[in-house]
Image (cartoon, rainbow, N blue to C red):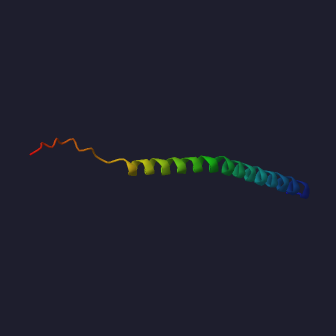
Amino acid sequence: MNKAEQVAVKLRIDQWRLNLFDISQFMKALNEPIARMAKKSNLDRHAKKKMTPSFIDYRVVTPK
């Protein structure tokens, strides 16, 4: 490979690295708010679940 080809390959590799970094940053920025919403939803759901009884007692108590 001559010097011009080496430079061209290096430039292409550098461009790929930049593109991958940009995609990585985009996915991070996209995923973070989604993850925060999911976490809040899970916390809300678990908080509601703890406040409601896990069973309802339908037995009828007769007075004595």
| Direction from residue 15 to residue 39 in the image, left or right | left
Q: Is residue 58 above or below residue 22?
A: above
* The one of 54 and 25 positioned closer to us in this rendering: 54
User: At x 90% / y 58%, what residue is drawn?
Assistant: 3
Front residue of 33/28: it is 33
Q: Residue at x 51, y 47 (%)?
A: 41
Q: Which residue is at 12% across, 44% downward? A: 63
Q: Quadrant of the N terminus?
A: bottom right
Residue most toward the left? 64
Which of the two residues, 43 or 33, is positioned nearer the viewer here?
A: 43
Q: How many marks?
A: 0
In the image, farthest residue toward the right: 4
Measured from the top left, where is residue 61 in percent x and y?
Answer: 15, 43
Which residue is the extreme one toward the front? 64
7, 15: nearer the viewer = 15
Q: Residue at x 59, y 50 (%)?
A: 36
Is residue 58 left or right of 47 when viewed as pictured?
left
**x, y percentage for residue 26?**
71, 48
Determine the image quadrant of residue 2. Answer: bottom right
Where residue 23 sits: x, y (%)?
A: 71, 48
